[in-house]
Image (spheres, helix red, strand yellow):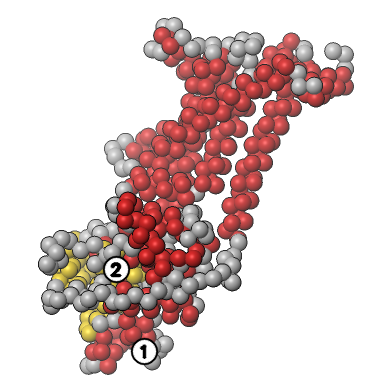
Amino acid sequence: MNTMTDSWGLAARLILDADPELVRIALLSLQVSATACAIGAVIGLLLGAWLAVARFPGHSLLVWLVNTLLALPAVVVGLFVYLLLSRSGPLGELGILFTPSAMVVAQSVLVTPLIAALSRRLVIAALADGGDQLRSLGARPLTVSLLMLAHDRMGVATVVLTAFARAIAEVGAVMIVGGNIAGVTRVMTTSIALETSKGDLALALALGIVLLAVVGVVNGATGLVHFLSSRARRTAPDPKAPSAPPEPVAPGAPAAAAPDPLVVLEDATVRLGSVTALRGVTLTLRRRDRLVVVGANGSGKTTLLRLLHGLVPGTGRCEQLALRPEGRLPRVAMVFQRTFLLNLSVWRNMWIGLWLAGVPANERRERCRHALARVGLLGHIHRPARMLSGGEQQRLGLARAWSQQPDILLLDEPTANLDPNAKSEIESLVEEVAASGVTVVMSTHNLGQAKRLATRVVYLQAGRLVVERPVAHFFDGEALPAEAARFLQGELGWR
């Protein structure tokens, strides 16, 4: 080869003519790296999901090890796999050294820590957004973690594509365990190194161009994934989309017996790290109660609801009492201030909620249909849940909780940041739930809402229960403690 120009010309001709050797080497590279990436994805995603939620002695050490392996040099991986697969190694009997199978093993070892570490970070970020809400539906920690990976499918796709790009571009591991045997284990990176050392620049350049094109396609696919994800987040829901009004449903028959206690708190205290979020709360929650909890931000309203649901541990007595005459503990469901919805359709969000709650398979379809009809979303079952308006998302969250047929429904500021029409819709649904015999506990800043919906009102300040009264006595009875009176004076919207 005399000139660089000649080399480029011959390289272009090899590509355009689909030279058989070039094609064979490129296809083997794609096969080995894709197989290794698939194996690494299965192991790495499961490992990352598990590490995100598992807690055991040595957990931090294992996380450190996985993160350290991210920077593991490919030649070290090749040496490690070579020692395992050599005749004197523990896996020597497999006889796969210097075969494509050995190269798959080496690249799998290389990409698995990358996928595990990045997927763990994806899950941890998603858990902060909706982990408690999935746990409130009955999901176990590993189930929550796996659902979060399904939720962030775009992020998972980016992780896997990144791993594939690293696998197909590495040379050290496949050179050591594959031996770069012509027609057997020669891949693009090893061929480029060999042909360059031999002076055959045309084939080396052709392979380099193909490899660059493959990596470019992978990077382009990664960019496309990010674009589609950001576009989906920016797409506003169609304001003209039909929304059927909630089905009128006859209230359930009132309980025959006098209201019985369902949950008893005595001197309940919750500490979150160094912060005491609740201190010495004594409260009895009775059947058919409509208990509204009011107080300023940081007063402990959300923590009280989480304690009633068992999402946070507390000291003192916090006991659920058996229903009478049913003889079972009450079922509890919760709607959070901002409903977390999986990146799936409306129907699948409902179905998964019932699956997590342990509802038998033969009941799920009818419960989904009935609950969605009650909140006016039956016509939207195929829409992406996260594309619903704010009010529709809260209605879906309420339907998901309602479908579990709870005895106690906890609502954490369910109308916060909603427009007046959406607030009115949610209030109507809450009244319907309460009329069916469900005990409702709701936190709110809206005193007018408390006056309309409550039978009892609790005022919290700095984690302490300052006063608890029937709704009429709270607003129009004898003078309230000074702290509660000042709060009412500052919130004039209810007047």
Mark 1 or mark 2, earlier in chain: 2
Residue 442 falls in image quadrant:
bottom left
**Residue 125 coordinates in the image, percent (x, y):** 46, 51
Residue 489 falls in image quadrant:
bottom left
Identify which amino acid the numbered label 1 is placed on.
Gln
Q: Nearer the viewer, residue 352 or 286?
A: 352
In this rendering, would 467 be left or right of 142?
left
The relative height of residue 480 versus residue 290 in the rendered view (above or below) is below
In this rendering, would 80 be left or right of 300?
right
Name the residue beneath numbered marker 1.
489
Q: Nearer the viewer, residue 347 or 77?
A: 347
Identify which amino acid the numbered label 2 is placed on.
Leu
> For the residues carrying marks 1 and 2, which lies nearer the camera in this image?
2
**Residue 9 coordinates in the image, percent (x, y):** 85, 22
Q: Nearer the viewer, residue 418 or 369?
A: 369
The relative height of residue 357 versus residue 405 in the rendered view (above or below) is above
The image quadrant where one finds the C terminus is bottom left
**Residue 150 coordinates in the image, percent (x, y):** 46, 47
**Residue 47 coordinates in the image, percent (x, y):** 40, 36
Say which residue appears at 52% left-offset and 68% top-offset: 389
Residue 167 falls in image quadrant:
top right
Say which residue appears at 61% left-offset and 49% top-offset: 226
For the question of whether residue 271 can be seen, the reply is: no
The image quadrant where one finds the N terminus is top right
Say which residue appears at 43% left-offset and 49% top-offset: 148
In this rendering, would 448 be left or right of 172?
left
Say which residue appears at 78% left-offset and 17% top-offset: 201
Name the residue beneath numbered marker 2.
409
Q: CA distance from mark 1 to mark 2?
A: 29 Å
Helix, strand or loop at disc 1? helix
Q: Are there few (<14), some (14-19), or many (20+) residues within 10 Å of tag 2?
A: many
Helix, strand or loop at disc 2? strand
